[in-house]
Amino acid sequence: MLPLERSIPRAATTEPTWVRRIIIGLGVGFLLLFVVVPLATVVIAALSHGASAYGRAITDPHALRASSSR
Amino acid sequence: MGELWTIATSDRALASYKITFGASFIAATINVVFGTLLAWALVRYRFPGRGIVDALIDVPFALPTAVSGLALTAVLAPNGFIGQFLEPLGIKAVFSPLGITLALVFIGLPFVVRTVQPVLEELEPEVEEAAAVLGASRAQTLWRVIVPPLVPAMLTGFALAFARAIGEYGSVVFIAGNKQFETEITPLLIMSRLEAYDYPGATALALVMLLVSFTMLLAINGLGAWTRRRAGHIT
């Protein structure tokens, strides 16, 4: 009685583990390729000349003026 | 009037419509496939990093388009992270229609995920259980119970991604290369008309884009209404 009650609903409303893995893999892989890689490139390029160069670039008077609302 | 028609139907303009609408259509289609897949994985499955994946979906919304354009160009260039693998295969991913399409895929992804996701969350598992109890296989349940209410949301996501892709400028201009007749998108052509102080010419092109977009959105909405009615009949 009990094992039957447990096994039917689970199999009926979800996919086998391998199908789930493929779907998750495809989705996450797509996101990695299209979003994470470009995003990482931006961060790496921004810091490629070191943290101090990054700090100088964002505190440059022109940058500050352009990003303030006044 | 005749002059406007000449501008709007010039060879250069026609080539730009082809690339703009073609790339946008392909990109929106890819977005529907992978966007729905991602929405499904996020709603139905629990896996490590799910919260991060959910947050990353919105990055294309948050990133300034010029930044995403430059980032994608850097990644896909022959010496870039992904481009270095495409180069030996003879695939040109920057300054080509492929590059334009890839940029539009990036821009449009959140539209599909964020329209399909809430609809999936609203689907009651009881309906699927009922289908299973009534003897439906998982494939039948998927096709006849889950997909019909999902189709209108997928169409809306497609329409949003497509509409955004047609007007997209910032993220495309860097990766496109903007070669006349090859990789020149219509928004760029409008821009160059404006820079030449040719306002009527720019408006003529804008009008064509407006008409095509409007017709396509109308068709997609009509299709959505039809699928909703059909779904209503099934349940």
Image (spheres, grey):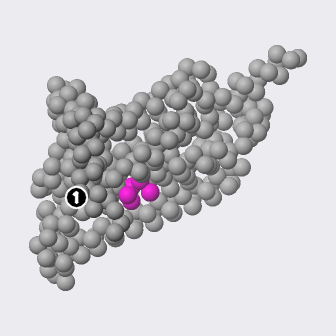
In terms of depth relative to the viewer, which is nearer, A35 or B213? A35
The residue stretch that appears in magenta: B159-164
Name the residue: 36% across, 45% down. Answer: B106
Asked whether the viewer can see residue B5, the reply is no
Number of marks:
1
Above-or-below relation of B150 to A62: above
Whether residue B54 appears in magenta in the rendering, the answer is no
- Determine the image quadrant of residue A14: top right
Quarter of the image with the N terminus of chain B in it: bottom left
Question: With respect to residue B110, does B86 lie above or below?
Answer: above
Give the crowd class for mark 1: few <14, some 14-19, many >=20 residues within 10 Å. Answer: few
Q: Name the residue nearer the viewer: B205 or A48.
A: A48
Host chain of mark 1: A
Q: Main secondary structure of the magenta part?
A: helix
Label 1 belongs to which residue?
A62
Q: Give the percent coordinates (x, y) of residue B82.
A: 26, 30
